[in-house]
Amino acid sequence: MKKIFVYYLRPFYLRMAWGFVIKFAGTLMDLFLPWALAYMIDTVIPANGRREILLWGIFMLLCSLLAVTFSVVANRMASRVAGDAIYVIRQDLFAKVMILSDRQTDELTRPSLISRLTADTYNVHQMLGRIQRLGVRAPILLIGGIVMTLMLDRVLAGVLLATLPLLTLVVVIVSKRSIPLYGRLQESLDEFVRLVREDIAGIRVIKALSREDYERRRFKEINRQVVEREKKAAMTASATSPAMNILLNLGLVAVIVVGALRVNAGVSEVGKILAFMTYFTIILNALLSISRMFVVLSKAAASAERIGAVLDGRDEKEWGIGEEEAGQEPKKGTVPHIAFDHVSFSYNKIADNLTDISFSLNHGETLGIIGSTGSGKTTVANLLMGFYDVDKGSIRIDGQDIRTMALSRLRSRFGAVFQNDVLFAGGIYENVDMGRKLDKEQVQQAVRHARAEEFVEEKGGIGEKLDIRGANLSGGQKQRLLIARALAASPEILVLDDSSSALDYKTDAALRRELGEHFAATTCIIIAQRISSVMGADHILVLENGRAVGYGTHRELIRDCPIYREIGRSQMGLGEEEAYSAS
């Protein structure tokens, strides 16, 4: 919360100050009305001065008009400040999400990040608007009302003031309990968003497996948890209003009884009692507004803490030495293009996902990586592109440790297709270009190289629009467009992670020929489940449980690596001699 008030609201301090001044002036107009009414009843009317009555009536009307005008102007200013401030917060939050380290993203989880960008920023927006509208008006009405009652009748004011410590105690206790409850509610909302996101994305699978009832039960459970936590938080926060109503109404009864006795004794006047009851109502409404504001603040405090956790999170720029050594010239030709030197890595820092991995590639060579699911194939690509930092060993490109490179410079060398990669709603051109300002000829050429030209032309060319996640394309068509995206900027290093799983063998072979002819100088890393996708590579790395169990050419691995040989037999039905001849 401190970051929001100290950092994000600082540019708006002057506008907020003007809004506070205008709101203050309008609130004073509201406070003058009961006092003017009391003066008219007790002084002007008994004197039977019609002119004075008219003048005081005009004064009260003017006060009412000014109060309304100032309130409208101040509220509009408050809305603008809240909107402008939350715009900047959302921009910074989204920008931070874009550069969070993958480890930080894993810890926070993607559904939670979505919730923080939406529900949490909404709660903060509500708080910023409410605190400017009621944060000035309610305290001024409260303090001003108490001052005016003291000026009217100190005895009656004493009766009122006796209830204030109890009212304050109610607000403090309820606020202290409600803030943690709203924090737990937001955690449940994260799980809610995650489940909805998964079910909507996988709705075809759910239908195909007839798991609708199962998913409904899961949704019912998380929905019940959200509702229960929301009820608990809301009921705790809402206890403020009835408790304050009881205390204030008891105080009001006491004021009426004491006031009646004082009027009967001739030590007070009817106008003062009426004005006093009006001020009492003003004070009551001010306290209720303050209690409601504490509810909003409770939500916002929990949300601000979650937003702050993202904004203060460790981003990718902190993982390496950074820009200072980014200008080093690579030693091309004198050292391997890519070298893994005894690399070990663990996602959870308990058990290694990769253990002691070493290999090297020269410029233009191709490395195939194959292994069972969970063997660490994708982890190799994640480490090479700097999504995670190694725990042991080092990764070098042209002799330079990638930890000493600026990430933008490191990743500009790559073209990549990842598992479950994404196509965005927009044109084919935009999806291939991805904001890199490539000309149309480059995009069309990349489409040709990816063997996607035929179906792209059938759909109307590179200007054709795609649905979200490429829903209007087949699996193979999506993969070919993703490969075109990776090839479009003529990358120095090409990473293809399971990018041909939806392609038929003929298209897969044609694509590999295309890469060999037009990207001979590009160093390639092909991660695949199919042995046919990697058997022509210069080097093949076989992984099993995060360890290298084989490294060499197809012929060497068929001869020396039992796991690789078994993959060849199961996928292609090749015996040892047949495998040699096929290669």
Image (tube, rainbow, N blue to C red):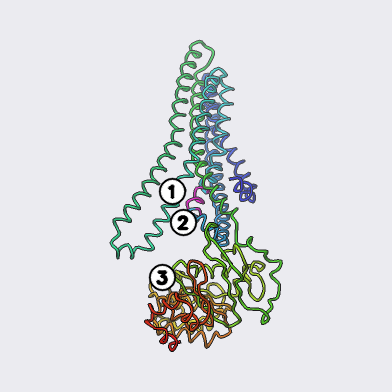
Residue 432 in view here: no
Residue at 61 percent across and 71 percent down: it is 341
Residue 493, relative to residue 243: is it above or below? below
Question: Quarter of the image holding residue 317?
Answer: bottom right
Q: Amino acid at mark 1?
A: Ser
Contact, CB < 8 Å: mark 1 with mark 3?
A: no
- Whole-percent x and y of residue 179? 50, 40
SS for tag 3? Answer: loop
- Whole-percent x and y of residue 56? 55, 29
Whether 163 is among the magenta residues is no
Q: State which tag comes first along the sequence, 1 or 3.
A: 1
Task: Give the residue pinned by disc 1.
Answer: 188
Structural distance between the alpha carbons of marks 1 and 3: 31 Å
Q: Amino acid at mark 2?
A: Pro
- Whole-percent x and y of residue 328? 71, 73
Q: Amino acid at mark 3?
A: Asp
Point out the stretch of residues depicted in magenta: 116-124
Task: Give the residue pinned by disc 3.
Answer: 467
Left or right: residue 479 compared with residue 7: left
Q: Of residues 483 and 25, which is closer to you in this image?
A: 483
Q: Estimate how packed mark 2 is, as few (under 14), some (14 to 19) or many (20 or more) residues with alpha carbons within 10 Å.
A: some
SS for tag 2? Answer: helix
> What is the number of the mark on residue 111?
2
- Whole-percent x and y of residue 567? 42, 76
Q: Nearer the viewer, mark 2 or mark 3?
A: 2
